[in-house]
Amino acid sequence: MTNFVVKTLANAAALAVAIWLVSGITLDDGSSTGRRVLSLILVALVFGLVNLIVKPVVKLLSFPLFILTLGLFTLVVNALMLMLTSWLAGKAHLSFHVDGFWTAVLGGLIISIVSWAVNLALPDKN
């Protein structure tokens, strides 16, 4: 349970950095700071579920592209997962939005780097 909470908070931190750095990724509906933090945590949960359920299937189906591009296709898969999270967040009436594919590529790259750094800094408790 602790590992799940740590990973969700790491996702939330990574999403917050992407929202802060990339102008095409937004999480603002004019509400209070507490509501935005709650929305960010809910979006992090959605993002975690997308990465847990959908991403392995997409990676398996696109395995030849990973081989052909020497792993650079990972950027495309991460962007697609971020766009799927944006779509699902819209369906759940959360104020998270990604403006397009190239914005999602940049956001996915930032999220990957920040998640890696946060997970490296936090202890891994099983």
Image (cartoon, rainbow, N blue to C red):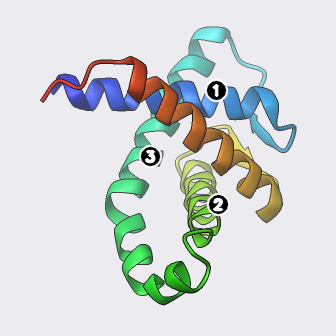
Q: Is residue 66 above or below residue 107?
A: below
Residue 82 image position (x, y, % from top left): 60, 54
Residue 101 image position (x, y, % from top left): 77, 64
**Quarter of the image where the C terminus is located:** top left
SS at mark 1 in the image = helix
User: Seen in the image, is 100 located left or right of residue 33?
Assistant: right
Q: Amino acid at mark 3?
A: Val
Crowd class of label 3 (few under 14; some 14 to 19; many from 20; radius 10 Å)? many
Crowd class of label 2 (few under 14; some 14 to 19; many from 20; radius 10 Å)? many
Mark number displayed over residue 79: 2
Task: State the CA–CA distance, disc 3 to disc 2.
Answer: 15 Å
Q: Earlier in the sequence, mark 1 or mark 2?
A: 1
Mark number displayed over residue 16: 1
Q: Amino acid at mark 1?
A: Ala
Residue tagged 3? 46
From the viewer's perspective, is the residue at label 3 or at label 1 nearer?
A: 1
Q: Quadrant of residue 52?
A: bottom left
Q: Amino acid at mark 2?
A: Ala
Mark number displayed over residue 91: none
